Image (tube, helix red, strand yellow):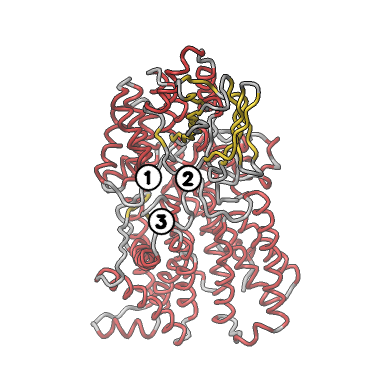
Amino acid sequence: MDSFSAIIKKDYRIFVLFFFLICIFYGNTLSNGFILDDHAVIERNSYVQSLQYLPKVFTGCIWESALGNCQATLYYRPVMSLSLLLTSQISLKPWLFRLVNLFYLFLAVSLVYLVGSFIISKRFLAFCAAIIFLIHPVNNEIGNWISTMPDVTLAIFILLDLYFYFRYQKTKSNRDLILLNLFFFLGLLAKEQMIELIIIFIAIDLLFFKIKSRDFLKRDQVKKYVCILVPLLVYYLMRRSVLGPFNRITSEGKDFWGPYTISERVYAFVKLFAIYLGEFVYPLPLMMLRQFEIKNNLANVSFLFYVLIFGGFVFIIYWLVKKKQNLLALSLIWFFVFLLLPLSVFWVAGGDVYAERYLFVPSIGLCFFVAAGLNSFHQGDKKILAFFKRVGLVFREKQRRQIVMAVIALIIVVSWIVVFPNNKNWRDDVTIFRANIAQDNKTAFFHSVLADELFNRGDYEGAKKEYETIIQLNPPHYGLDVIYSNLGDHYYIFKDYAKAEEHYLKAFELSGGKNYESNYQLGNIAAEKGDYLLALVKFCQATSINPAPDAQTRYDRVVSILTGVEEKDWPQLYNEIIRGKAFRKDQTGKIRLKYKACLYNNCVYTLDVGQMENEIIFPFLIMAKILPEGTVVRVNQPSYNPNKGEISVSIDNTAENKGAEIVFPTCSGSYYEVIVPTVNQ
């Protein structure tokens, strides 16, 4: 096995070719701007724009600036943060970040060739694999989107780790073992999927080094795998210290494991595998995301078809292992292993969609598989030549070389015709999603992101059209409450408050009252109409969902208005509470009178509120109607004892022989009524 340096000296022209191909395939992407996540993680991320935040590379996360903390994200990727931070010290222009991303792509392609040449000592095979990997249209997204950097850097560290893994198996050198673990650790800091490389190591041991299962307990094997656990443990502790314990709730407040049944997950896993395999074979048309239908019935014909593809793939691996075609078997195992995470948690991409970028690392395996076929023909494999001979074709060595080179040249030309024009679609957010919608008008995610971007640009009518399209599509497992809320924003801007209120109420209904924007805007509309009780409820609900400064300020202002209501207007306020739009009477009787104590024309009522632990009572709105004359008063200094689950209210101008109807308005929009009988009742 030649070392890296020896291969580079011998084959430096190949690396020049890689550089040249990247220039002609992706040179025009340098004029494009930031796209989607780029805005949050680069353009508006102060933590990657100044070296004073260098410690944040490891003590923070890439989404901290956008989300306000790291507890609402699952991504801990310091390699990306460091790269962006260092790049921004030169310039914050998009072209420089794109150039750095293309440099990483060049490194990944070069390492495919270097590692392939080192491991299998077949440079032509490694060359073919690297070329296919570089120019394959399915990797177009990686070449155009800066935020896919974790996938490129992951590929780099995986390949470097493989190199030192093979070196260590040969040398048993502690130096190689240290470097093996170092690159494994860096790979984890690049992207979480690095952990899947351990499965590849086991496959290599079984296929290439012929290690029997019982031999895994030998000292050398135990030492190697135990050492890998060290960087894994360090990474886990670092990640936990920043993100906290693994949280199943995503930043959007949704269950990380998705809103799917077991049968739906199985269906999606098998179907997506078949789809990704098909995408490698025929990736057209190129799209950022594609929607796929999930079914709950595993007995349908389509699922059986996908099972047949998946089963056939597994059988081919088994057959290749039996035939000792270890490189081919490992290539297919590689493809499957690095697809495991996208197949298992596909909804992280945005619902019932799949993304081409998830094929970047897995495609390396299939590139070697295809390259092995080209190499076998080039080298004159007897079985391949016998096959062609049976159909009347005989190829000499020179002809075989010419045919293979012609095939590679044809693949390059066809791929360029596809990739180069598509780069222009990545100019900005509007362009990329209009291009995707032109290919697929049924994916709600495309319309949603396009609508948001048009809205931000002031094209409200264009945004409205996209939002209405999503409602017509009525996609399953999609947050339509947000869409209705966004439509409400459109009408609110044009002061059509009736239409705005209609859409905000629909958003409120669909979200079960958990949509911040609809609550906040309904509060604004109510305040503008002078309905301060309803405004109070909506602002309170909004701050309960998200304690944003705007909602809190509006809430405090309404509290001030209601607190300042004069005594002569108390009866009107009382009637608005029990008969208005803001509150509805709760019939559950959660508040019950425990005892009443009166002294010197003042009565203190102690009530049991133990069943209301999660409800917010407005203390300044607790009012009472004194019976029998019907005088309305406000309570004085209500106090709450959480240990006993009691609330005490004091009411002036009452007598021991009088009763009262006390109302307790709450943030939920309900009010509780407690009737205190007179002595004679």
At 65% from the left edge and 49% from the top edge, which residue is drawn? 242
Q: Label 3 amino acid?
A: Pro
Give the amino acid at mark 2: Glu
Q: Earlier in the sequence, mark 3 or mark 2?
A: 2
Residue 278 horizontal side relative to residue 564, left or right: left
**What is the crowding at mark 2: few (fewer than 14 residues within 10 Å), some, or many (at least 20)?**
few
What residue sits 32% from the left and 85% below the top? 386
Is residue 347 something that shows in the picture? Answer: yes
- In the picture of the structure, the residue carrying the numbered disc 2 is 252
| 202 relative to 156, above or below | below
- Give percent across and percent down for residue 432: 36, 41
- Residue designated by label 1: 479
Q: Residue farthest to the right?
A: 174
Q: Are marks 3 and 2 in contact (CB under 8 Å)?
A: no
Few, some or many residues within 10 Å of mark 3 (<14, 14–19, 20+): some
According to the picture, the residue beneath numbered tag 3 turns out to be 259
| Number of other residues with Cα within 10 Å of mark 1, as a class: few under 14, some 14 to 19, many 20 or more | some
Name which of mark 3 and mark 1 comes first in the sequence: 3
Determine if residue 95 is in view: no
Work out whether residue 287 or residue 480 is closer to the camera in this orientation and state it. 480
SS for tag 1?
loop
Q: Calculate the distance from the C-alpha at mark 1 to the C-alpha at mark 2.
A: 10 Å
Contact between marks 1 and 2 (CB within 8 A): the answer is yes
> Circle 3 sits in a helix, a strand or a loop, which is it?
loop
Q: Which quadrant of the view contains residue 459? A: top left
Residue positioned 47% across, 25% down in the render: 627
> Which amino acid, mark 1?
Gly
Q: CA distance from mark 3 to mark 1?
A: 12 Å
